[in-house]
Amino acid sequence: MEIGGKAKSLKILTKAGFNVPRFISYDGQSPLLSSILDSNFCGIEYFAVRSSAFGEDSANKSFAGQFYSAIGVKRKDIPREIEKVLSSYKGREGSVIIQEFLPCESSGVMFTEVDSNKIVINSTLGLCSTVVNGEACDEYIADKSGLIIKKKIREKNALFFQYGSCIQVKKAGESLSFQQIKQLARIAIKIQKLFGVPQDIEWAFKDGRLFILQSRPITKAPIITETEYYDSANIAESYSGIVLPLTFSFAEMVYSCVYKDLLRKSGVPQKKLEKHSSIFDNLLGTFYGRMYYNMNNWYRMAEFVPGYRRNKQNFESMITSNIKAEIGKIISPSIVLRIVYPFLIGFKVLTYGITSRYFKSSVIKELNSLRRNDFNYLSYDECIKSFDEINNKLLRKWYVTIENDFFVMTYLGLLKKMLSDTEIQRVLTFSSKATEQVDALASLSQKMTKVDTLWSAVQEGDVKIFDSEILNHNGIKSELETYMYTFGGRFANELKLESKGIDEDSSKLLSVLKLYHSYGTRVLADKQSADKPLSLGLKKRFILNKFKKYASQREEFRLLRSNTFSMARKLFRRIGNIFATENILNSTDDIFYLTLEEILNKNIFISEYKSLVEQRKDEYKSYSNITPPSHFSTSNRQAPNAVSPNRQTGANISGQPTSSGKITGRIRVFREFFIPSQIDFDILVTSHTDPGWTPLIALSKGLIIEHGGILSHASIVARELGIPTVIGVGNAMTFLKDGDIVELDGTNGIIKVQKHENR
């Protein structure tokens, strides 16, 4: 008997070992249907009767939705449904599929893509009829390893089969677990390899088991209409370069929780936040291992509270956004919130001093509690418990720091209206924790130089001798412990969990101390003595003082964040050690190639973690040769093309002046952070900096940085230390080379090349 395209596909899947519900292909002619059913479906009560016309689901045509199919069919009604299927062929030849019906817990369709490692999964709770019919459903985009790139969770009409009939229920929760997404992604890639072309696959989960209901070639790619905008903006200052899966998924979780908490504290109902949870779950995106803001969802977030236009502009200013896009509004604040919001904000302003003090004291208290743990001896369950404490007792309070950021941007916006750009530079200097770190390093270094055996260990970078020798000098030991307590979580790439801290690699600290012996006592930049003092009226002075208060506090909060992430890093490294000991992973550091969900929820796929990690290592290694754009738009979720930076030609380049003064000197280009053996340069050139660059910045006489703004950490430190700085020099890393002699004008933002080295 000749069978149709759909039945042929199911036979191939079954032969290849995929879990396909029992089925037969029936031509509609045999009078022995009852006997056939008895012999093939003993004990089965309900069936799916599907079309399988000749040519259906071929590579050229799918006829999807054109022929009749039925689900939940009782045995006695099968002949009637067969007639309906055959009638829908309208003269075409074909057979009918009679298949065991699955009253599943979740189901849907997924699509593989040509020349892409991405899988698009549409899913719902219950039967997938609602998905096939185009109703609202959850959407996931995953890579071939199951790493979730993006997800949208919607309120949906779930269809459940109970007692012989379908019952429709409104559901808002997620329809898939991350384990199920991983399993679907793996199966989708296998099915595509089996057929050799991209596939449209219908699937279902019943009692935890994955069943493949049908698979057909994709004859037309899914249409994705909304243009999405991505901008690395200032997130690249915190997460520069390639970021591994654990760091990205952890950051994704933190952003989602913090901004939901912020809006809840701003009067937005919890139910409304849950309805739009996909916005918060997708505030970030990753392409080629680099992190971006999903600008669409940041703009959507600004719609929840009154003053959308102002909120949007404040956000763009806060992140130094390259994109100023407009998207259609879909969310509006309630009438009640519109009325009470001004009073709520007023109350927040009046009580923020109390709020911020409580936040700082509670975070410090919790950090002290976590520090008492000996992470080297924690079990997996104890690590998870400690992580829950970090999440619930620390990160769930972090919305307070976002409120502080809004105060900073509000007062900065007022100052910009009152003062010129040059005047802004002259008044924005304020004391911060960063320069306290510089002073502490200089003090430690100078004291160590007076102890020959200790200083010799520093110069040689001998950690073992240093650790032994410092025990003999209680005063220096105590000062070092104070430094580690305050600044132990501060180092370059401090928010990237895969980065090793100075407490894990003491050689980093010794390298810094070695250079600081000649630093001497820091002389703070005093702009008002170097330049003619600005005469500010009472109103301007009040606003300036408010700005400095919140900006200084912003730097304090950043340091608390560094130390909080340090605790999380210790926990994950410990879990990595446990997984390596139990032969789940090959090494401790492999933990950073897993996602947060994969670590927190050990599951049936744990035996595959080794191969999963190796696969991701190969993938991330390939990213190192790709230079993606800093911002882009896409309407098909495809990664952007690699780009070359826009080049300024001639002898001069320019950017935004953020710390005034002039310096002529030799440059050194830092493609990543490291402490050189000696300071043989005057001007530091790099793409991004984070707070961990402070020790190196303090040893420089000038800064040229490709990305950032007036409130970037480098700008703040440079103003305080009197280091001329120009930021936003788009092609500095390609235009300038090690050894070039340049004149850096931090007042006007001009860089003049006086001598090119070896060109």
Image (spheres, grey):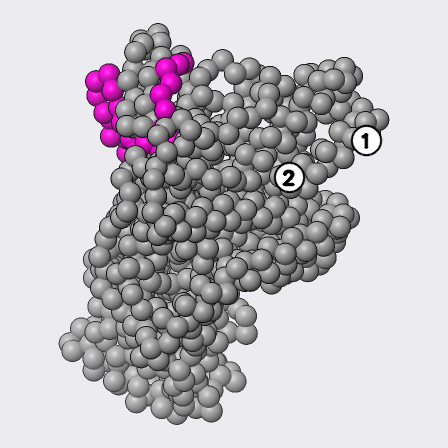
Q: Is 313 on the left or on the right of 194, as rendered?
A: left
Residue 488 numbered mark, or none: 2
Q: Residues within 10 Å of mark 1 (few under 14, many from 20)?
A: few
Say which label, 1 or 2, has the lower sequence index: 1
Residue drawn at the location 32% of the way across and 23% of the way down: 745
Q: Residue at x 45, y 30 (%)?
A: 526
Labelled disc at residue 474: 1
Horizontally, residue 419 falls left or right of residue 604, namely left
- From the top left corner, tell me how far across and down residue 148 is, in percent: 44, 55
Q: In terms of depth relative to the viewer, which is nearer, 719 or 27?
A: 719
Mark identifier at residue 724: none
Q: Is residue 262 visible?
A: yes
Q: Residues within 10 Å of mark 2 (few under 14, many from 20)?
A: many
Image quadrant where one finds the C terminus: top left
Q: Position of residue 532 (x, y in %)?
A: 35, 30
Can you name the residue that lies furthest to the top here?
Answer: 758
Q: Is residue 579 left or right of residue 333?
A: right
| Residue 635 against residue 577 in the figure, above or below | below
Q: Where does the N terminus fall, quadrant-wise?
A: bottom left
Kind of residue at badge 2: Gly
Residue range in magenta is: 642-666
Please report the residue visible at 36 percent of the width from the left and 24 percent of the height from the top. Answer: 661
